[in-house]
Image (spheres, rainbow, N blue to C red):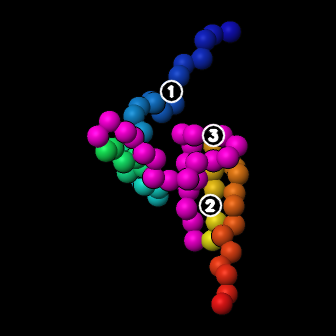
Amino acid sequence: MGKKKGGGEKKGKRPPSKSKHKKIQIWNKYEVSGKEVKRKGESCPRCGIGTFLANHKNRKTCGKCGYSESMVKKEE
């Protein structure tokens, strides 16, 4: 029995994907004043400092652990 010859398609570079998501602009999450660095966003209570909660229309979520808080509007 002989060896099989690879006559299939050749593998090459894939075309760039068209991502629906924006790239994270981490420099917008911090504010520098003098020698102090202040975090603008809210941190995740499970993961700790350094992991921010994403703001949606009706909730805040953590992309790392899945923690979520619902934001309920108070009616007056």
Quadrant where the N terminus is found in the figure:
top right
Three-letter code, disc 1? Gly
Residue 59 in the image, given as x and y percentages of width and height: 64, 66
In the displayed structure image, the side of residue 42 where residue 27 appears, left or right: left
Three-letter code, disc 3? Gly
Task: Name the N-terminal-most of marks 3 and 2.
Answer: 3
Residue 29 disc label: none
Task: Name the N-terminal-most of marks 1 and 2.
Answer: 1
Q: Is residue 1 above or below residue 70?
A: above
Q: Residues within 10 Å of mark 3 (few under 14, many from 20)?
A: few
Dot 2 falls on a residue whose secondary structure is: strand
In the displayed structure image, the side of residue 65 where residue 38 appears, left or right: left
Real-space Cα distance between discs 3 and 1? Answer: 53 Å
Quadrant where the C terminus is found in the figure:
bottom right
CB atoms of marks 3 and 1 within 8 Å = no
Q: Residues within 10 Å of mark 2 (few under 14, many from 20)?
A: some
Residue 60 disc label: 2
Q: Is residue 64 magenta?
A: no
Q: Circle 3 sits on which residue?
A: 48
CB atoms of marks 1 and 2 within 8 Å = no
Going 53% across and 22% down the picture, which residue do you hit?
6
Q: Circle 1 sits on which residue?
A: 7
Tag nearer the camera, 3 or 1: 3
Q: Residues within 10 Å of mark 1 (few under 14, many from 20)?
A: few
Magenta segment boundaries in residue numbering: 34-57
